[in-house]
Amino acid sequence: MASSVENETVGVLYETIIGEDFDEDMFRVLRHLSVDSESTDEEIASKANMSVNCVRRALYKLYDARIATYRRVRDTKTSYFVHLWRLLPVKSNIQTYKKKAKLVIDKLKQRLEYERENVFYHCGNKNCPHLTFDEAVEYRFKCPVCSNPVQFVNNEKAIEFLSKKIDELKREVENLPP
């Protein structure tokens, strides 16, 4: 059995991989899964002191995130299918996270390029869209939704934010084990 420090470290790693969908039920289930052995959802529920439905919900989220896997076998006594769950090796999870992070970095870079290459205008109404210079000229510097005049919007803060976020994610990916 892993120490509580190791469990916390693994929990943080998986929380990073899964993102905001990671919850306490998933962490409790993770504590009772192993790379080396398989467990049924009923066994995990018993060990974690959780309902089987909560355990199954958490297991399927872990499966969707490519953290856990299962194999289905037929119980010879009952003829029902039983799912035997286990963790995937951490290395494959890190690789999955790296791929996701690189996709996010690419999208952020595209957005940064768009922000740098355009000048924006806006009427001040939260429900109205920001317009590029070409769109503002096309609409004669009037909002196409509310017809109010549009004003120049300084997007330096957005550019700065995107640049910082890209750098943070790059550093995070570089600091992960190979």
Image (cartoon, rainbow, N blue to C red):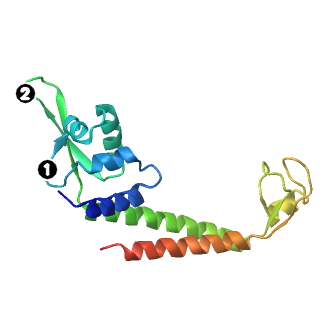
Residue indicated by mark 2: 76
Where 50 falls versus 11 (above or below)?
A: above
What numbered label is drawn on residue 97? none
Q: As drawn, is 29 to the left or to the right of 102?
A: left
Quadrant of the rendering where the N terminus is positioned: bottom left
Residue at horizontal 27 percent and vertical 60 percent from the top: 4
User: Residue at the location (86% across, 53% down)?
Assistant: 143
How many numbered discs sit on the rendered protein? 2
Please provide percent x and percent y for residue 130. 77, 58
Q: Nearer the viewer, residue 129 or 38?
A: 38
- Other residues around mark 2 within 10 Å, as few (<14) / some (14–19) / many (≥20): few
The foreground one among 155 and 41 is 41
| x and y percentages locating residue 11 in the rendered image | 34, 58
| CA distance separating discs 2 and 1 | 20 Å
Q: Secondary structure at mark 2?
A: loop
State the SS at label 1: loop
Q: Is residue 142 left or right of residue 155?
A: right
**Residue sitting nearer the eye, 22 or 136:** 22
Question: Residue at left 35%, top 62%?
Answer: 13
Q: Which residue is mark 1?
A: 37
Rendered position, 14 above or below 113: above
- Check the image and name the residue furthest to the top: 78
Q: Earlier in the sequence, mark 2 or mark 1?
A: 1
Q: Which label sits in the foreground, 2 or 1?
A: 1
